[in-house]
Amino acid sequence: MLLALEFDHVLALLAAETATPQGARVAVGLRPSWEGAVVVREGGLTVEAQRYLDGSGALPFGTLPDPEPLFHRLLVEGSVLAPLDVLDLIALMKSGRALKAALSEARGEFPNLWSLARDLPDLGNLIRFLDGKIATTGEIEDRASDELVGVRRDLQRGKERLETVLGDVVSRPEVARALQDDFISIRSERKVIPIRSEARAALLGIVHGISGSGATVFVEPMETVELNNEIVTLRDREAAEVQRLLQEYSDLLRGRLAELRALASAIGRLDLVMARARLGRRMGARPARPATAGEIRLSGARHPLVEESLRAEGGRIVPLDLALEGGTRVLVISGPNTGGKTVALKTIGLLSLMFQSGLMVPAEEAILPVFQGIFIDIGDRQSIADRLSTFSARIRTIAGIVAAFRPPALVLLDEVGTGTDPEEGAALGVAIIDHLRQREATAIATTHLEVLKAYAAETPACANAGMQFDESTLTPTYRLIPGVPGRSGGLEIAEQLGLPGSILEAARARRGRSGEMIASYLARLERLSTDLESRVAESEAARRRLDEDRAALEAGLRERELRQRQAVASEIEMALRSIRDAGDSYLASLKDREVAERLRRQEAKAAEGLRAEARRLIRGVSGAAPSGGPAAPKLTPGMTVFVEGMGVRGTVEEVAGARVALRVRGKRVMVDREECRSETPPGPAPADRGPRLPPGVTLERRGDPPAGPEMQLRGLTVDEALARVDKYLDDAYLAGQSPVRLVHGVGTGRLQRAIAGLLARHPHVEGFGRAPEDEGGAGVTLVRLRL
């Protein structure tokens, strides 16, 4: 099944996206899962890996060799790894630590990836012990042990002494005249001097060899024999220490072999998940969604291998659109030869395998069931060795499928019922498909047989689909048309391929009247389907254009209305600014500070009233509130509304045209209908009593404590006291506080007289007088407010 659907080629593409040998090995051995929970989990991992790639890039796998051969060697007790082998395993352990650290930092955003890295074995102690003791060239570093440091130090000193002695020897006149070359040679790991054969007597020593021509004798001077012996001994000690260290390192790694294997396996698993994400990005693939009712939906699906082949040739694939509802068990695909029926069949099967292997699928949208098995019978299965014809081999395959499958299963049959007598083959094909339908398999079959097309049209839970055939060019378009059986177009294709016309005419004459009528009917049905599809596409395009035009028109109207409102508001603001500037100039000329302050307050209130009136005028012109707020609601008695100008809620008692009678805090008040809003205001209305404010004037209460029943003024200057009393009276009035006490003391009486003058002309004051003796007498003034 996997080979028939070329799943192995997809796995080869997946392996090419891996970063480690163990990841590539896992990728090549990947198999689909038949468990829904596993399919969903693996698909979620791939999606999360793609998000990681997009946001953070590749995981830090590093460059890792294949550790499996090293693991096999460590299984042999007493075996010793080479220095570079030890370095490879150190790199493996470092990679595990780097991966764990990288995913630990992002575990909140990528919890599924972190779950794979969380349990990576921690071999930090082993890394710290081994790291830095082997050079990248494979040489054991001096610091690997004290013994090695001492031996190499002695070896270096011995070499230096040897060089000095050799220099003295060759500098002697008799030796210098006998030299064959001006350099020192090495024979049998000992340094020797090349002497001409005829001058052999010029140097006393041990001969270690003669050149091939016989002209040179290699002599170790007697003066250096002991030094060379010492160096050879030190080298043997060095080699023994290196071997001892490698044995120690190998034994340490052997003791952690189980953890090393678990680490390599986990790294391979992580590499596989990231490779699935990279392959999905390379294919332009998307995650498929599990079906909820056994349905199959593919939109813009592409066979990845066909697409890659066509791309290499500069061509483009025709995407497959297919919808099989949950209650439909059988789909019969018909159409012309070379029209794409088999490719469509393979695309459905291959994308199902990819989905159930945790891979993204190359499609705009994909909804697929989780099958318990995927079976396919396709191609020429003739076997000369087994003495099986094509028909016999295919029937044996189908018999195996029928015996093996368990629902839910996907069964793909290519040209079912062919290879034998057409009438018997058609009957056999119908019987096979109907058996699969009754056993609740999802069966998709391709055919040229009219009997199978009729079966799909007349049988419940079955459907037809046809590969489109272009009548104008007599060529297939490779597009699948649902609900309509396809026309084979064999004679037309034969004509395109150059079959002589006389043969074609004879074939048409022999086809028979019924066959000609069926072919004509299918051709007409295909033309109607194509025309309908074209009209639907044109209607959809026209609808989109209308929607775009309407949206553009509405946006233009909104923008023009906004500009008009902004222009009117700007003119009103400029007028108010001019009035305010003139008022400020006038107020600045006043000497009476108290009068100036009162006029400023009245000016601000008047300006706010003008703004409110301007907003009403703008609403009247544009039909909408300047701020885009809702229009005045339909008011009915008993409705609770919020009065914007007063900042209070009230209950509607009566609606009289543009005016509304409200019950507010037990009092009946009349307000403009436009000031009423049925929606909840941004903040709660004040619960305490307060005055009615003019239309257009809003009240913003700050977080200061509410006005109390008494104000302390002792110790203040007259100007300070008057300013505080003025503000206090406003706050008390708004808070509904009356009467109030002003404690100013007796003193010279100047402060009391100034306060009395302010109270006499204050608009909120209804009356005032001296407090009784037991409540402060002349030092306190009692004030009643107009509430």
Image (cartoon, rainbow, N blue to C red):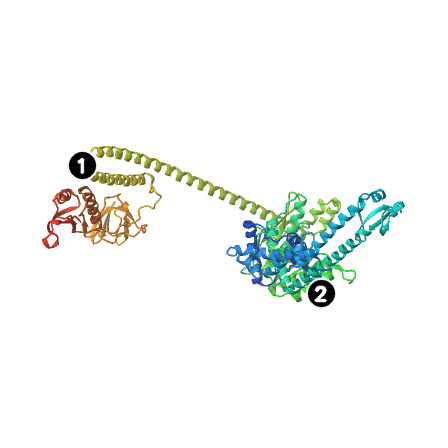
The reply to whether discs 2 and 1 touch (Cβ–Cβ < 8 Å) is no
Considering the image in quadrants, where does the N terminus appear? bottom right
Q: Amino acid at mark 2?
A: Gly
Instruction: Decide which of tag 2 and tag 1 comes sooner along the chain.
Output: 2
Closest to the camera, between mark 2 and mark 1, is 2
Apparent side of residue 418 relative to residue 614 in the rendered image (left or right): right
Q: Secondary structure at mark 2?
A: loop
Q: Work out how far the residue at label 2 is from the one at label 1, CA to CA, in angstroms.
A: 110 Å
Say if residue 700 shows up in the picture: yes
Say which residue label 1 marks.
592
Say if residue 145 shows up in the picture: no
Instruction: Give how far across and how far down residue 243 sits, in percent.
Output: 71, 60
Say which residue label 2 marks.
78
Q: Nearer the viewer, residue 166 or 711?
A: 166
Instruction: Give how far across and how far down residue 191 sits, in percent.
Output: 79, 50
Q: Quick one: which residue is furthest to the front in this view?
A: 173
Apparent side of residue 400 relative to residue 193 in the rendered image (left or right): left
Instruction: Give how far across and how far down residue 109 sits, in percent.
Output: 51, 55
Q: Amino acid at mark 1?
A: Asp
Apparent side of residue 385 relative to residue 773 in the rendered image (left or right): right
Q: Quadrant of residue 254?
A: bottom right
Point 66% across, 46% down: residue: 310
